[in-house]
Image (spheres, rainbow, N blue to C red):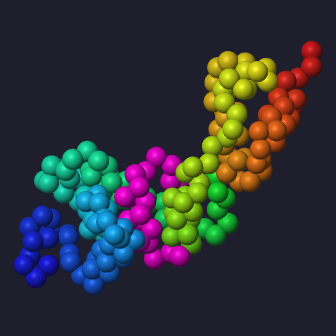
């Protein structure tokens, strides 16, 4: 920052001890490789507002994936208060973080002051994003679920149950779905 390079990119960008620490942490967790450009830029823009980050994206003409990491980081920052809730369920964590790029998630984990939010982001990165129900739409049809939006609704509820540890096997999933169907389908 002594050369004023960051201010040339955007007046709100500042090189300081906080940024130096976060960039060093990014290097440590990425070792032996270097952190991605997206991760570096996500940390750099973390203090910016949405408008300021968009100005920087436009000015630098960032590639799509890097621009996505920057936008995602700014968006995740707005969810940190919710992520800092120690009572947040795994499915709640998943719903807040699903769809964001890995560089943005890592940057947010490094940048947040909340140990709880950091743990939740790390849990998503290491485990939750990989959890999926065993049953598929075809399995649900076999269980006599009508084709249409109900299949997606049931798969989403099943995914939540799996994330929250309410089901752990295909048999558990089938029993849960059958229970839901018994409640939803009224006898004539």
Task: Pinpoint residue 11: horizontal percent, then vertical percent.
Answer: 15, 69
* Quadrant (top left/top right/bottom left/bottom right) for the N terminus: bottom left
Residue, x 33% and y 54% (percent of image)?
69
Residue, x 64% and y 57% (percent of image)?
90
Residue situated in front as seen by the camera: 128 or 6: 128
Residue 104 in view here: yes
Task: Pinpoint residue 155: horizontal percent, then vertical percent.
Answer: 67, 35
Q: How many marks?
A: 0
- Left or right position of 125 against 154: left
**In the orientation shown, which residue stands out farthest toward the right?**
188
- Left or right position of 80 against 155: left
Task: Pinpoint residue 7: horizontal percent, then vertical percent.
Answer: 12, 71
**In the orientation shown, which residue stands out farthest toward the front?**
32
Quarter residue 28 falls in = bottom left
- Left or right position of 78 against 43: right
Residue, x 25% and y 59% (percent of image)?
37
**In the orientation shown, which residue stands out farthest toward the bottom?**
17
Residue, x 80% and y 34% (percent of image)?
174
Does the magenta-highlighted stretch encompass residue 155?
A: no
- Left or right position of 87 against 166: left
Residue 117 in view here: no
Quarter residue 15 falls in = bottom left
Does the magenta-highlighted stretch encompass residue 108?
A: yes
Residue situated in front as seen by the camera: 87 or 131: 131
> What secondary structure characterizes most of the magenta part?
helix
- Considering only vertical position in the picture, is 99 above or below 22? above
Residue situated in front as seen by the camera: 46 or 143: 143
Segment colored magenta = 93-115
Task: Pinpoint residue 93: horizontal percent, then vertical percent.
Answer: 58, 57
- Considering only vertical position in the picture, is 127 above or below 85? above
């Amino acid at each position: 920052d002594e050369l004023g390079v960051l201010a040339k990119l955007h007046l709100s960008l500042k090189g300081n001890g906080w940024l130096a620490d976060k960039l060093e942490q990014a290097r440590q967790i990425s070792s032996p490789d270097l952190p991605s450009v997206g991760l570096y830029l996500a940390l750099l823009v973390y203090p910016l507002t949405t408008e300021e980050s968009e100005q920087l994206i436009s000015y630098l003409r960032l590639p799509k994936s890097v621009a996505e990491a920057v936008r995602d980081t700014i968006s995740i920052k707005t969810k940190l208060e919710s992520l800092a809730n120690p009572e947040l369920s795994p499915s709640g964590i998943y719903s807040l973080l699903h769809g964001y790029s890995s560089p943005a998630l890592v940057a947010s984990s490094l940048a947040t002051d909340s140990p709880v939010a950091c743990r939740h982001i790390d849990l998503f990165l290491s485990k939750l994003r990989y959890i999926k129900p065993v049953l598929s739409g075809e399995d649900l049809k076999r269980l006599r679920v009508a084709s249409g939006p109900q299949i997606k609704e049931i798969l989403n509820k099943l995914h939540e149950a799996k994330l929250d540890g309410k089901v752990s096997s295909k048999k558990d999933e089938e029993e849960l779905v059958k229970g839901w169907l018994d409640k939803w389908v009224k006898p004539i």
